[in-house]
Image (cartoon, rainbow, N blue to C red):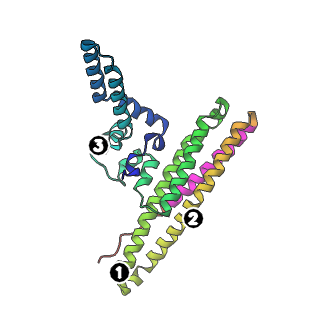
Amino acid sequence: MRDPDRFDSAEERLPPEARRRVLRAAFLRPWGLFVIVVGVFFFTTTLAWWIIPLTLATYAALVFIATRDPLFESRVLGGPERRLGTRPGSLKEREVSPERRVRWLPRGEIRQKVEAALEVHRRTVFAIEESDDVARAVLGDAVPKLHRVAERLVDVAEKREKAAGAIRDLETSAGATRREDWSADLEELERELRAADAEISSAVEKLLRLRARVLRVSTESGGAAQDAAAKLNANLDELNLRLDALRSMMSPPEPPDR
């Protein structure tokens, strides 16, 4: 069975500019251009009409496959470090979209909640991009803030999973005596875990409210639209501050020696 995490289409995972870059690179891929050249050559020498649709169909298939190839996408968007296979957690991971990074999380409830939040984020950004000129003008600052929310939410989810792993290591690796020594760290990690779970669980609801405000801005005009946009930006700033603070707070200690 095909792995859905590996071959999801770029339209579902990437922002518009990145999708355009991938599509442009797919159209200009050497193999595709070679097929066009060969098709033109054989048509001019044989005048067989069926060569034209066959050539176009082959070229379209190569473009289609390229736009859904994660390795090709990484080469187009990621630079030399990504091509060498940089692992999640490196400095280069910030160049990867949150929609892609969330697929590195363990399967489970946390990943599902973050994926749901990212879907609301994507629809909110799309609603802004599809608004009229007035709405886009007053909401111009909201788009990068929304992207920051998505990135920070995935950051928190990643650190949450690391904290959960650290808790498991502390509970299973240390003996009874050592466990007492680590009890304060366990309590701190568990507090951080509960805080992360609460923030992740409420992310969808918060983003849904923000999306509703975006739709409200698109129906207002003049000063009312500016006031609604100002409140939206204030809410985004507050959410980013909360996520930044939570992300900074979460730093699990090294597990005990076995």
Q: Secondary structure at mark 2?
A: helix
Distance of label 1 from label 3 (alpha carbons): 40 Å
Distance of label 3 from label 2 (alpha carbons): 36 Å
Magenta region includes residue 226: yes
Residue 251 seen anywhere in this rendered image of the structure: no
In this rendering, the label closer to the viewer, 1 or 2:
2
Sequence-earlier tag: 1 or 2: 1
Contact, mark 3 vs mark 2 (Cβ under 8 Å):
no
Kindly identify which residue carries mark 2. 198
Measured as percent of width and height from the top left, residue 171 is found at 40, 78
Sequence-earlier tag: 1 or 3: 3
Query: Residue 177 is drawn in which quadrant?
Result: bottom left
Measured as percent of width and height from the top left, residue 148 is found at 52, 47
Residue at the spot x=35%, y=43% of the render? 70
Disc number at residue 131?
none
Q: Nearer the viewer, residue 98 or 235?
A: 98
Kindly identify which residue carries mark 3. 83
Q: Nearer the viewer, residue 20 or 239?
A: 20
Contact, mark 1 vs mark 2 (Cβ under 8 Å):
no
Magenta region includes residue 233: yes
The single residue placed furthest to the bottom in the displayed view is 177
Q: Amino acid at mark 1?
A: Ala
Kindly identify which residue carries mark 1. 174
In this rendering, the answer to whether 110 lies above or below 56 is: below
Circle 1 packing at 10 Å, graded few (<14), some (14-19), many (20+), is some
Residue 197 seen anywhere in this rendered image of the structure: yes
Measured as percent of width and height from the top left, residue 43 is found at 28, 16
Q: Which residues are magenta?
A: 224-246
Q: Amino acid at mark 3?
A: Arg
In this rendering, the answer to whether 70 lies above or below 22 is: below
Q: Amino acid at mark 2?
A: Ala
- Horizontal relation, residue 228 to residue 85: left or right: right
